[in-house]
Amino acid sequence: MPRKGFKSADRRMQILEKAGIAFAQYGPEATRVKDIAELCGVDEALIYQHFASKEDLYFEAMQHLNENMVADWIGIAKKAKNSFEALRLIYQHRLGEVYEYRHLPAAAMYAYLASITDERMRKASTDAFLKAQNLIEGLVRKGQKEGIIRKDLNPASVASWIRSYPLFVDLAVILGVDEAFPLESAMQHLENLLETLKVKSPKSPSARK
């Protein structure tokens, strides 16, 4: 029986969040619905009141992670003072989450692998990928119009190689080599990367002497 005072929507959200952690730790094949129920502190039967099967739960848990990521990025971009600052804050947030919630990189990798054979997962992952790509490309274009980001750069190319850096960090965390590559170093490399995008201010006559 559900606990009194715990709304169905809240319970469903709790299950999705706990399921994402479990699937990342053990993999989608090895994870049992029983394991997720134990993490949630509920009976296994309650899980099936919200999700028809383990496969449905896995799909929705991964979709939940993707939707949260894109929503977070959009929220960060809206609060930033300009497009360049939005890029910086989005990727600082992205790196910070990976080091704090170490299950996230594994969850993403499992979802990518599942997309090879699962058409539903492939479509959901593709949609999330393109939403993120379009958001970053749009920020680069806006930054070029604002005169902050170099106009000689191709926005699609910039978005692609900026987005590839966090994947390198994901791999470092998954392999456990992040002790030799701590968050502070990851953030500094990010800063160095972003600095290459900026329009350089012309030096004053006195500075050129």
Image (cartoon, rainbow, N blue to C red):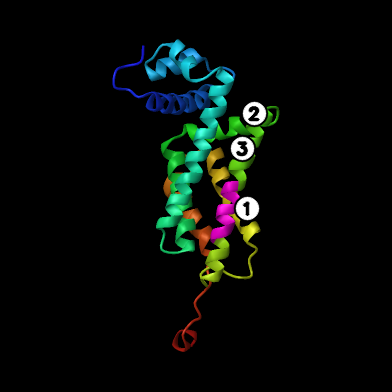
Q: Residues within 10 Å of mark 3 (few under 14, many from 20)?
A: many
- The outermost residue toward the left is 5
> What segment is highlighted magenta in the picture?
131-139
Task: Name which residue lies at 55% across and 70% down.
Answer: 145
Instruction: Residue under label 3, please give it.
Output: 125
Q: Is residue 172 above or below residue 7?
A: below
Q: Secondary structure at mark 1?
A: helix
Q: Is residue 66 above or below residue 77?
A: above
Q: Which percent across, then down, holds residue 102?
A: 46, 34
Q: Which residue is mark 2?
A: 114
x and y, in percent, of residue 198 in the image: 52, 68
Pick the front one: 138 or 116: 138
Q: Residue drawn 52% across and 27% down? A: 24
Question: Which dot marks residue 174?
Answer: none
Please state which amino acid type lies under the numbered disc 1: Ser
Q: Is residue 207 visible?
A: yes
Given the image, on which type of amino acid does mark 3 rest? Ser
Residue 179 showing in the rendered view: no
Task: Examine the rendered structure and indicate whether residue 149 appears above or below residue 5.
Answer: below
* Residue 90 lies in the magenta stretch: no
Residue topped by disc 1: 160
Give the position of the N terminus as an image quadrant: top left
Q: Nearer the viewer, mark 3 or mark 2?
A: 3
Q: Is residue 186 left or right of residue 30?
A: left
**Is tag 3's residue or tag 2's residue first in the polypeptide sequence?**
2
First of labels 1, 3 by sequence position: 3
Front in this rendered view, residue 80 or 158: 80
> Whole-Å distance between the Cαs marked 1 and 3?
16 Å
Specify few, some or many for label 1: CA neighbours under 10 Å numbering under 14, 14-19, or 20 or more.
few
